[in-house]
């Protein structure tokens, strides 16, 4: 579900960017997020079974909380375009749903 929904959102984000004349920017914040993701992935690779599941879910919960904070505190307040605000709201709703599902799964491990 995550892979499918994240890919769908990424495609919608790129299409919106084309529509409103914005291009993805490689900023320090973007570079930091990429580095953080690579570091988290490298820590998951050697894990197996339940140890992997617990670490993966903990990372998903932490990262989805961070994305919600970024949307709420940085992206939404800065968004001036109506289409962009709408896309951020939809994205936020999906991230919040992913967070709740990860919390449910974590509880049942």
Image (cartoon, grey):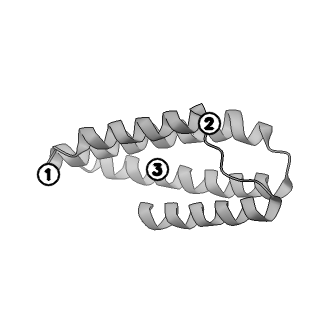
Q: Is mark 3 on a helix, strand or loop?
A: helix
Distance, label 1 to label 2, CA atoms, is: 36 Å
- Mark closer to the observer (1, 2): 2
Q: Distance between the residues labelled 1 and 3?
A: 22 Å
Q: Which quadrant of the structure image shows residue 8?
A: bottom right
Image quadrant containing the N terminus: bottom left
Task: Say left or right for 10 vs 90.
Answer: left
Pair 1/3: label in front: 1
**Residue 104 against residue 16 in the figure, above or below:** above
Residue beneath disc 2:
27
Give left or right: position of 64 versus 106. Answer: right
Read off the residue under disc 1: 49
The image shows residue 78 at horizontal and vertical percentages of 79, 38
Front residue (pair 35, 78): 35
Q: In this view, does 93 lie above or below 68?
A: below
Q: Which residue is drawn at 54% across and 51% down?
A: 95
Would you say the residues marked 2 and 3 are in contact, meaning their CB atoms lie under 8 Å apart?
no
Whichever of labels 1 and 2 marks the residue nearer the N terminus, that label is 2
Quick one: SS at disc 2?
Answer: loop
Residue shown at 61%/42% (left/top)? 26
- Alpha carbon separation for disc pair 2 and 3: 30 Å
Q: Position of 45 compared to 31: left or right?
A: left
Q: In which quarter of the image is residue 80?
A: top right
In this view of the protein, which residue sits in the foreground, 100 or 32? 32
Question: Mark 1 Cα within 10 Å, few/some/many (few <14, many 20+)?
Answer: few
> Which label lies toward us, 2 or 3?
2
Could you say which disc has been placed on residue 100 in the image? Answer: 3
Question: Mark 1–mark 2 contact, CB under 8 Å?
Answer: no
Residue at the image point whose x is 58% and y is 41% from the top:
68
How many callouts does the rendering have?
3
């Amino acid at each position: 579900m995550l892979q499918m929904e994240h890919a769908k959102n990424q495609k919608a984000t790129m299409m919106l960017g084309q529509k409103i004349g914005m291009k993805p920017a490689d900023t320090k914040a973007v570079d930091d997020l990429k580095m953080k993701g690579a570091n988290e992935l490298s820590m998951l690779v050697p894990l197996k079974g339940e140890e992997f599941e617990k670490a993966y879910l903990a990372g998903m919960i932490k990262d989805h909380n961070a994305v919600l904070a970024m949307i709420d505190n940085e992206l939404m307040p800065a968004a001036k375009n109506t289409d962009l605000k709408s896309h951020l709201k939809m994205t936020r709703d999906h991230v919040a749903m992913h967070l709740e599902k990860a919390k449910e799964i974590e509880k049942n491990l």
